[in-house]
Image (spheres, helix red, strand yellow):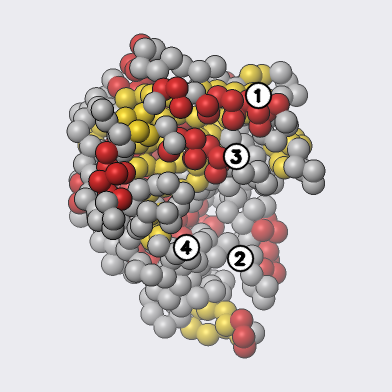
Amino acid sequence: MRTPFLTTTLLTALLSSAALADTPQTESWTAPNGARAQIAAATSISKERLASIDGLMQKYVDENLIAGAVALILQNGQPVYEHAAGWADKEAGTKMTTDTIFRIASQTKALTSAAILQLQEQGKLVVTDPVSKFIPEFAKTTVYVKDQATTVPANRAITLRDLLTHTAGISYGTQPGISSLYAEKSLGPAAGHGWYTADKNEQTCTTMARLASLPFVAQPGAEFVYGYNTDILGCVVERASGMPLDEYFRTHITQPLGMRDTYFFLPKEQRRRLAAVYASGSNGKIVRSADDAKGQGHYVDGPRKNFAGGAGLVSTARDYARFLEAIRNGGVLGNARILSPRSVALMTTNQIGDIYNKPRMGFGFGFEVVESYGASGMEAPGTFGWGGAYGSNYRVDPTSGLVVVLMIQLMPNNTDFREKFASLVYQSLLPNN
């Protein structure tokens, strides 16, 4: 179903009840040959051009490349596009709807990063603190040197800043030489997907303390290495706040922002709203994933003890858009302020120089950041975002006032659906007349 543009009172109430249309806080940027002026002028969205997304979504459903998807686009806080296509559970005959709940995996990282900055604003930590201040097991860590097949001591303590920017040298334990060691400690891909901990019958801090005994893959501050960094931060949030991570999120982020459908573990009475997970088969067509850690997961019937700050949440497109709109708006949504504008700036500007692994891109305290036009499709400099292992993706483009959320459940995802979707979003932006 596609929601009529700006006319659906229910959607507007859901998304605008907390004043989503507050004036956006944007950063200026420069580009050669008039590009800045041309892109900045493209602030109107063509409804006719946006409608082409409907056809793209249905095409991929009809060709069995995806089971279904939900897309939601806000501009300057107002909903301009919302569409659900296909199936939430094809085998059960359950259609995708705009309030379907999805596993968002690494999209959890942004909320955990925001929580760390909230705690800094509360005076309970500073991002330069060593991790060992909160998790003593991290006082002395080691690094695996691949060329020498040996382990050496880390040359300095890992800090919270290292974790926020994924420069602590901590992976998901997939590399040759260490994967077997991670498996012995019930971590890494042998334990599921590496990042997956929903099935663990232990608290997050127990898992992260065990991680500290394993070798990492780079010296602190030397490289961008994607891994358990934000899961460790989830434990830090618990230790610094004195609250379980799910309770901290609920009282400091999701409840204030009106995110009513965001959880670590879905209430059992809501299980029918959770979309099924599919995988791209050898021929590219979807195959329903198994009922295990590598497939459907334990987000309803799991032990409900391990709140993974790096990959644990389930949510809806509407809920996640509320969080992103608060970030786009400088940390506030209506009367609910979750961060100061300065903290938001730390999240959304490059904090690691040129060591990010994509040219002309950077990484802030929780988000990937576009630094020059053309580095990521048609996204303007200053655009930030990330995605999740189950195929979900989001982008925030302050120059055009856009918040874009795309939800699917496809892992692995061997399609070009997300790339084509992004192109259709940006081709709809036209100059004001």
The answer to whether marks 1 and 4 mark residues whose Cβ atoms lie closer than 8 Å is no
Location of residue 359 (image quadrant) = bottom left
Q: Which residue is mark 1?
A: 87
The amino acid sitting under disc 4 is Lys
Residue extending furthest front?
33
Q: Earlier in the sequence, mark 2 or mark 1?
A: 1
The answer to whether marks 4 and 3 mark residues whose Cβ atoms lie closer than 8 Å is no
Location of residue 372 (image quadrant) = bottom left
The answer to whether marks 2 and 3 mark residues whose Cβ atoms lie closer than 8 Å is no
Q: Which residue is mark 4?
A: 358
Q: CA distance from mark 4 to mark 3?
A: 20 Å
Depth-wise, is mark 2 or mark 3 nearer the camera?
A: 3
User: Can the viewer see residue 255?
Assistant: no
Q: CA distance from mark 3 to mark 1?
A: 16 Å
Q: In this rendering, would 189 be left or right of 319?
A: right
What element does badge 2 sit on? Answer: loop
Q: Which residue is mark 2?
A: 173
Mark 3 closeness class: few <14, some 14–19, many ≥20 residues within 10 Å: some
The answer to whether marks 2 and 1 mark residues whose Cβ atoms lie closer than 8 Å is no
Q: Nearer the viewer, residue 397 or 262?
A: 397
